[in-house]
Image (cartoon, rainbow, N blue to C red):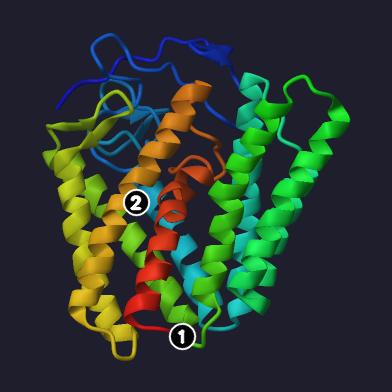
């Protein structure tokens, strides 16, 4: 497997702009030989950096450069929280989702400030909280209305700060609205039916299967780079592991949890999900490279920021919702 270029930056600046003032980590970008400070194997979300001997801060890390036991513990804790909320009171899950999306929105908008991009906070935050709630209560019509009003409020609010940088700031705000606000509404649509708890489990489990299968297959087998200029650690072997795991988990869960569901339907959903999950991870990698940072936050030990966990989910939610509606209508 390809080695890593040591991180020799001081932490004050990045190669493409000043480091954000929040928890985002500076990212030095790819070196001349196509590698980066990230570990270069695997296909999951970039983990913490490791030293040349595979340690970081005196702690042994996995092959892909993250503190694996800590990452697993945090992941299991989040999974337990999701399952508990889904199968007790679904509205608890809705609240948890809104909190996570809100934190992710804060990470993204704060990271934008490294490029002097100022997203109007109040309209985006209002849309981030309100869209999933009204969608859960009133359905897809409310999703369209809430998202449209969010963008309109964004355009109007930014006018009070003058014309300088107006297009830049509202464009970034519209990106956040489409990237996260709409995602919140889509997940609320998954949650809304009587069997919404099962639909959410399928959606999250397939996405996690993509990350997990890709991480282990890429870590131990990864040799051929998928997109070295975007995410040097992603490999074709990792994507293959993601696909096999996604299809297996999807086929099993759709057959087991959905009334009238068939294995082949779950396999197709899993196959579609591996494409969107991989694309979502690459999209976030592209955003971080443009901003010159490694992670968008540090709130989740062993994982990075909330957005470093939401990237695949954001892209996968619309596809899983659409295919489940086609195969097993609510």
SS of the residue at dot 1?
loop
Residue 161 location (% of width, % of height):
85, 28
Q: Is residue 61 above or below residue 323?
A: above
Residue 79 is left or right of residue 159, and the answer is left
Q: Residue at x 39, y 57 (%)?
A: 316
Q: Is residue 326 above or below residue 313?
A: below
Instruction: Look at the image and tell me in which quarter the C terminus lies.
Output: bottom left
Q: Which residue is mark 1?
A: 195
Residue 249 shows in the view? no
Residue 259 location (% of width, % of height):
33, 91
Q: Residue at x 33, y 84 (%)?
A: 257
Q: Residue at x 28, y 39 (%)?
A: 62
Q: Quadrant of residue 4?
A: top left
Other residues around mark 2 within 10 Å, as few (<14) / some (14–19) / many (≥20): many
Other residues around mark 1 within 10 Å, as few (<14) / some (14–19) / many (≥20): some
SS of the residue at dot 2?
helix
Residue 48 is left or right of residue 13, and the answer is left
Taking the view exactly as shown, the residue that stands out farthest to the bottom is 259
Report the front residue among 289 and 135: 135
Residue 101 is left or right of residue 62, and the answer is right
Residue 50 shows in the view? yes
Q: Residue at x 71, y 35 (%)?
A: 119
Q: Earlier in the sequence, mark 1 or mark 2?
A: 1
Q: Which residue is mark 2?
A: 277
Residue 187 location (% of width, % of height):
52, 66
Instruction: Look at the image and tell me in which quarter the N terminus lies.
Output: top left
């Amino acid at each position: 497997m390809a080695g890593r270029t040591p991180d020799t930056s001081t932490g004050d600046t990045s190669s493409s702009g000043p480091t954000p003032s929040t928890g985002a980590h500076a990212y030095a970008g790819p070196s001349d030989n196509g590698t980066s400070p990230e570990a270069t194997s695997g296909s999951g979300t970039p983990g913490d950096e490791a030293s040349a001997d595979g340690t970081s801060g005196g702690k042994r890390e996995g092959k892909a450069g993250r503190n694996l036991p800590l990452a697993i513990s945090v992941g299991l804790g989040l999974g337990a929280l999701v399952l508990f909320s889904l199968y007790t009171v679904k509205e608890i899950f809705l609240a948890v989702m809104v909190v996570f999306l809100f934190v992710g929105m804060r990470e993204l908008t704060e990271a934008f400030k490294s490029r002097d991009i100022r997203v109007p906070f109040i309209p985006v935050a209002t849309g981030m909280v309100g869209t999933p709630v009204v969608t859960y209560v009133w359905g897809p019509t409310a999703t369209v209305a809430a998202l449209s009003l969010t963008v309109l409020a964004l355009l109007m609010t930014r006018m009070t700060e003058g014309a300088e940088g107006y297009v830049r700031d509202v464009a970034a705000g519209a990106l956040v609205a489409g990237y996260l606000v709409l995602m919140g509404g889509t997940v609320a649509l998954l949650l809304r039916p009587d069997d919404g708890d099962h639909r959410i489990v399928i959606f999250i489990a397939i996405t996690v299967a993509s990350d997990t299968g890709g991480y282990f297959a890429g870590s131990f087998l990864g040799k051929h780079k998928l997109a070295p200029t975007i995410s040097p650690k992603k490999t074709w072997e990792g994507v293959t592991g993601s696909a096999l795991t996604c299809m297996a988990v999807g086929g099993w869960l759709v057959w087991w949890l959905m009334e009238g569901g068939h294995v082949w339907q779950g396999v197709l959903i899993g196959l579609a999900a591996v494409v969107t999950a991989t694309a979502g991870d690459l999209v976030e990698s592209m955003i971080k490279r443009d901003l010159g940072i490694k992670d968008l936050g540090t709130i989740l030990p062993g994982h990075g920021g909330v957005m470093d966990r939401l990237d695949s989910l954001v892209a996968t939610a619309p596809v899983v919702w659409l295919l489940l509606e086609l195969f097993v209508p609510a």
